[in-house]
Image (cartoon, rainbow, N blue to C red):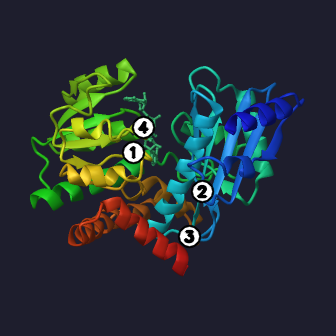
Amino acid sequence: MLMQVETRSLKNAGTAESLTVTDITEDASKLDAFDHHERIWLGRDEKRGLTAIVAIHDTRLGPALGGTRVWPHESFEAALTDALRLSRGMTYKAAVANLPLGGGKAVIWADPATDKAPALLDAYAEMLAQLDGQYYTAEDVGLSLADADYLRERTRNVSGTTIGGSGNPSPVTAHGVYLGLKAAFAYRNGHEDLTGVRVAVQGLGSVGWALCERLHADGAKLIVSDINENRVAKAVSAFGAEAVSADKILSADADIFAPCALGAVLSSETIPALKAKIVAGAANNQLAEHGDARLLMDHGVLYAPDYVLNAGGLINVAGELDRDGYDRDRVLKALQEIPATLMAIFERAEQLGRPTNDIAKDIADERLVNN
Ligand code: NAD
């Protein structure tokens, strides 16, 4: 089916002189990842190299807010599936964190290393401006703080910028992940001391690196992997980390696995190889399937649901909407909700014998329905 979207929308829209923004909700609704999304927009500008999907999942709690990912997915369908999954995750993230925001996310189907020319960002800024009031974006994988600033100079629907905003959310996200990871460790071990605890960190980007800094300061032993060899070399020298290849990080001899790269790393194929007994990381959509959380539970792994743990970035940009203006101290205080919520989820999951992500979803659904 999606090949139809691909050929029809991409061909028709792509021959235009400039940007076209098309509603592809009906086509997208045939995909498995579609989950009652409110609206899916496709922005195309062939001249300026833009193919962008903006997925608006649920705005019952507030306007849709979520970052823009720039990634060279293997097909348009893969990019669309990613946008659908990520935007749904944002709805749950905002609901569990009790924020007045809805779920949305964008994917620009392009290689951030080679395709992200100013013209592409100009076209994307025009698309965002056309969606004024529906969707607010921010940084994500492949879209840097400098890119967000560039967009913000052209349209107001961008948060997490240095132009009247709170700046890069990644360090705040990392801090929330760190607090949540410690809570998970404490839940299992009865104390928070990470000295000598082996943490396998997958992905040494903005969040993964800042997480490593905190874990290293606490005396944790780091095992790291990244497809970018320079980052790995830097981590070996800065933290005395042990480097492993990208395909070995899951089976590394670690106490905690912290996925901080892309999603779908935990699946029925990979979970049996996992050595760590705790999964606590920043990556969105870590589970290939919702049911994989039960598999983790059956393997005795405590899973900190990704969107609960990585809500720091969203809590940070939500701080920009505060009536009294953005206040970093207030945001850092609000991050304490992350370990508190996680502890409540772990306890409820254990009492009921249910996977932690089912409990997190229940909490989100309650907030969405009772809003
Ligand atoms: P980033 O682009 O700065 O870093 C991602 C890193 O992962 C890069 O260094 C990349 O080389 C590496 N990577 C990619 N594929 C890999 C693989 N197969 N194995 C090992 N490393 C690989 O992104 P980020 O901002 O640090 O975000 C990391 C994750 O956290 C993403 O899933 C993102 O959606 C999620 N997240 C980020 C924020 C935020 O504030 N930045 C907030 C919430 C969630």
Rounded to the nearest angstrom, the CA distance separating label 2 from label 4 is 20 Å
Residue bearing mark 2: 65
Quadrant, the N terminus: top right
Give the percent coordinates (x, y) of residue 173.
41, 50
Residue bearing mark 3: 100
Q: Earlier in the sequence, mark 1 or mark 2?
A: 2
Residue bearing mark 4: 206
Q: Amino acid at mark 1?
A: Gln
The residue tagged with tag 1: helix, strand or loop?
Answer: loop
Q: Residues within 10 Å of mark 1 (few under 14, many from 20)?
A: many
Rounded to the nearest angstrom, the CA distance separating label 3 from label 1 is 25 Å
Residue sitting at 37 percent across and 53 percent down? 291
Q: Residues within 10 Å of mark 4 (few under 14, many from 20)?
A: some
The residue tagged with tag 4: helix, strand or loop?
Answer: helix
Please state if 237 lies on the left or on the right of 111 as rendered. left
Q: Earlier in the sequence, mark 4 or mark 3?
A: 3
User: CB under 8 Å between callouts 2 and 3?
Assistant: no
Q: Amino acid at mark 3?
A: Pro
Residue bearing mark 1: 286
The residue tagged with tag 2: helix, strand or loop?
Answer: strand
For the image, the number of numbered tags is 4
Q: Amino acid at mark 2?
A: Leu
Q: Amino acid at mark 4?
A: Ser
Question: Looking at the image, is mark 3 or mark 1 nearer the viewer?
Answer: 1
Mark 4 close to ligand 1, CB under 8 Å: yes
Q: Is residue 368 above or below residue 107?
A: below
Rounded to the nearest angstrom, the CA distance separating label 4 from label 3 is 26 Å
Give the percent coordinates (x, y) of residue 323.
58, 72
Residue sitting at 28 percent across and 27 percent down? 235
Rounded to the nearest angstrom, the CA distance separating label 2 from label 3 is 10 Å
Q: Nearer the viewer, residue 209 or 79?
A: 79
